[in-house]
Image: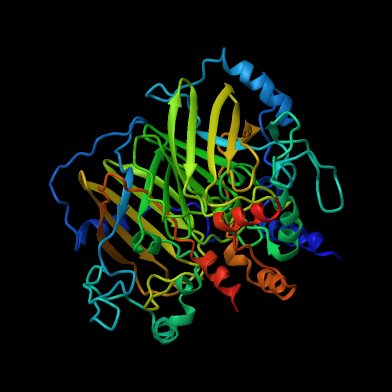
Amino acid sequence: MNRPFAARIVALVVIVATSSLLPPAALAQAYVSESVCPDNSPVTFHRCALEAAQSFDPPRTPIGRPDFNGTWVLPGGQIGGAYEDLEAHPRTRDNLGGPATVVDPPDNRVPLQAWVEAQIPENTQRYFHHNAACMLAGVPNTMYHGGPRQFLQTPDHLAMLTYNSHGYRIIPLDDRAQPGQKIRLWNGASSGRWEGDTLVVETSNQNGLPWLDQFGRFYTEEIEVVERLTLVDANTLHYEATIEDPNVFTHPFTIALPYRRAADENYELQELACYENNEALMRISRMSGFSVFPGVTPAEARAAAEATQ
Amino acid sequence: MRFSVRLVTPALVGLLAAGAGNAQPAADGYRPPQTVYGEPDLQGIWQTMNTAVWNIQDHAAELGIPAGQGVVVGNEIPYRADALAQREENYRNRATDDPEASCKMVGVPRTMYMPYPLQIFQTPGQITILSEYVHSVRKIYLDSAHPENPVQQLWMGDSRGHWEGETLVVDTVNFTDQTWFDRSGNFHSDALHVIERFTRTSPDHLLYEVTIEDPETFTEPWEMSMPLYRRIEGNARLLEYECQAYLELERNNE
């Protein structure tokens, strides 16, 4: 068994093992599929959503903002699609496969610098995927990893709870100051503002330890992410994120995804005690030679880029 | 079936009311503002300011541990004899056996008085308490029943709440037996039943009262009471204490 395959198996086994404690409903939650933009392929959906959002007057909270409250499901389920690979990828023995999530540049590829292309295979040979170690998934990965997610919206905050790793993000919608540069966080520090009926969220202060996908694409702590969330009909949310990190990417790129409303409006997000149940698997994985991805510092990235020129 | 629908029994409510305890409301008759969804507003970033994380009972100072007046009403915990022996055993082995020492979720009520901020969100039908400590999440569903046949025991329990006037009352069951009340070994079984009352007593104070019931561990219910204080800093936000991740990164060097 080659090592990259082993790494993915570890990630898969952790999900399956922890998820097996739950009813199947927690894995593949039914969603409302009727939509003005029914195609779940990110590129097609994105094009339709940009158009549809212009004429949609969304349901609103008591203060008149678009109402994002509810449980949202990522079509494609727990472990396929963007979670595996942001680019189009076939079904193989260790991938469920899926279409490209990158909507810009037009070739639908992640614009990696040359040295990064070379680094990626090493990542999957040596390190756990952050999800296998039950760590928070970072931004944007937390927005497309497993299971349903719940949005909690108040006049001054949006909180996003994920089933996976019982993660959460808290996005202040007031003009609260960003934390200082020394404060590095798995999920970064976000601030949100409304541009018409679109919520725009800027995120910095990440620690660069999670990956973008199971393929092993990574970034440094200098990553800046700008996300845009817009309702395109009552049961469909258009998610878009532009990712910039000049240490790793040749230029900024944009991904997009559909979120569909869970069919069961009383759905209750289950507790996934990932770390608490993960001790044996972590021990086995470490014995197989894997360790936690220690990250690439911006200085290391710049030195590596220079060395390959 | 232990995990059937449970409501706060009148006896327990009476007990709470009688023993209102260590933390008195700051101002009689304070009425909190309402949320946009029409409930008493408990939202914001809150944190306790006491020594319950070390020991929920009265304790003297030791190296690295401040002395503290307990948060247990009346200070005594009515352990059964065998449970008291276990509590003493826990105390001796606290450096390794405390679930906090291995970065696990600390359960309810302990998560409420960890030395990390909490943030409360109120949305239709649900109150959610997020903790900075290991990003633990409490989802409190309003006016609904505990599941009849839960599929697994929960580190943070199954919480159902309702409003009694301006007070949020939360009933939580279906716990694991893996969590403790503090770093000194006070513990419970998986028969734990927790009833909490959250009452705003001023703009910046939230009275937290909790009744603990666990017939396998205690001879009778007992209570804790403490204020939560609002983090009023203009830049306040929950950061991260990813305890288990720091442990795993340490293991990279072994």
Residue extending furthest top? A55
Residue A51, image x and y in percent? Answer: 63, 16
Residue extending furthest left? B28
In the image shown, does B60 or B248 lie closer to the viewer?
B248
Quadrant of residue A127 in the image? bottom right
Report how many numbered discs are placed on residues in the image.
0
Q: Is residue A174 rendered to the left or right of residue B96?
A: left
Q: Is residue B129 rendered to the left or right of residue B202?
A: right
Residue A80, image x and y in percent? Answer: 75, 44
In the image shown, does B67 or A205 lie closer to the viewer?
A205
Residue B82, image x and y in percent? Answer: 43, 84
Residue B88, image x and y in percent? Answer: 39, 86
Q: Is residue A108 rendered to the left or right of residue B14?
A: right
Q: Residue at x 69, y 56 (%)?
A: A15
In the image shown, does A92 or A251 lie closer to the viewer?
A251
Q: Residue at x 59, y 42 (%)?
A: A143
Residue A274 higher or lower than B145, as above or below: below
Quadrant in which the C terminus of chain B appears: bottom right
In the image shown, does A70 or A125 lie closer to the viewer?
A125
